[in-house]
Amino acid sequence: MTNLEHKPGIYAITNQTNGKQYVGSSQDIAHRWIAHQSDLRRQKHGNILLQRAWNKNGKEAFVFVVLEYIDDVGQLLTKEQYYIDTIHPFYNICPLAGRKTGTKYSTEACARISAALKGRKLSPERIEQLRQGLIGRKMSDETRAKMKGLWQDPSYRERMMRTRTGQKKTPEAIEKIRQAILGRKQTPEHIEKHRIAVTGKKRSQEAIEKQRAKMIGFRHTPEAIEKTRAWHMQPDVIERKRQRMVGVKKSPETIEKMRKAFTGRTFSDETRAKMSASAKKRIRTPEEIENHRKSIIGYKHSPETVARMSAVAKKRHQRKQEQLQSNQPKLPFGEVV
């Protein structure tokens, strides 16, 4: 151990008390043994089995042996795996060279790692390497099934929600995401899968209430409103929406909900002006006119609807008579009192 060379190679740490070993590799054998001893003395070693043995038997019980020096650094892990498979060292927690699978960190260790990584940013080169590594990569069916099972676990969803609470994307990140999905169209297969997945799925009352509370007071910017309006006016979008609604009938419950939502609702003068201007700009095609004509042939309002319309008409007529008697100006067309 006194004549260690600063070379890459494979080493073993042997407990002479019971013969148990730890096998590892390093690009600098001499420096690695110094690092091992330093971590073990300070109770900071990452291998809990080796740390416990060191604390129990003392430094004198351990000997550091170089199994082989390696000229080609690229062969380190291959050689280390060979010795792990041959010797079966007791202190190696993970049976695979170069990995930490099976290693469990204490709560304090997790907190230290979290604090060290906070605020740390990857270099552009590293980000590009990760991006290139993921291009064309597809998850196996087993992995997809595992992920689906995790997300169906309420405790996992709650834990993930807590980790993301309060997180806000930077304007740069938002712009990158926007540019990445700009012009991106979903395949018919993906659209059909999504449709099947959400068909019959109802949100919980808590989710609906959270969404409602989030939207209270929210207003779109004029630019966003204009973009949305322009998108909805595209001919292909109009046709897709029309095809989607062909043959669709609202349930009585949905109709009643919509009726209650609009009952007593009044529009401001600005909103009325906008709606009027929008309707004047829109020119229906002959096909739309014909489709609308066919759709109302034989259509009859329910007795309740007829009664409501009659009551509204009577109130409007009464109001007009009062205005005529007092020489007040007529109500604008379409106004309902």
Image (cartoon, helix red, strand yellow):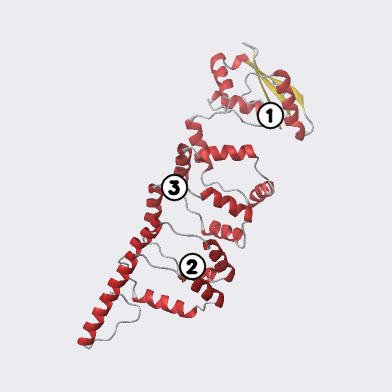
The tag on residue 147 is: none
Q: Which residue lies at the image location 57% right of the left edge and 67% below the top edge? A: 239
Residue at the far top: name it: 17
Residue at the far left: name it: 326
Q: Where is residue 161 in the image (x, y as percent from the top left)?
A: 46, 44
User: Which residue position holds label 2?
Assistant: 224
Residue 56 seen: yes
User: Which residue position holds label 3?
Assistant: 165
Tell me the amino acid under the disc marked 2. Ala
Quadrant in which the N terminus appears: top right
Tell me which numbered mark, 2 or 1, is placed earlier along the sequence: 1
Between the C-alphas of marks 2 and 3, the distance is: 26 Å
Left-right relation of 37 to 214: right
Q: Where is residue 103 in the image (x, y as percent from the top left)?
A: 58, 28
Between the C-alphas of marks 1 and 3, the distance is: 37 Å
Residue 7 seen: no
Q: Position of residue 182 (x, y in %)?
A: 60, 62
Q: How many labels does the image show?
A: 3
Tell me the amino acid under the disc marked 3. Thr
User: Which residue position holds label 1?
Assistant: 97
Between the C-alphas of marks 2 and 1, the distance is: 53 Å
Local SS, label 1: loop
Left-right relation of 95 to 258: right
Quadrant in which the C terminus appears: bottom left
Residue at the far bottom: name it: 327
Above or below, 172 against 207 in this view is below
Q: Nearer the viewer, mark 1 or mark 3?
A: 3
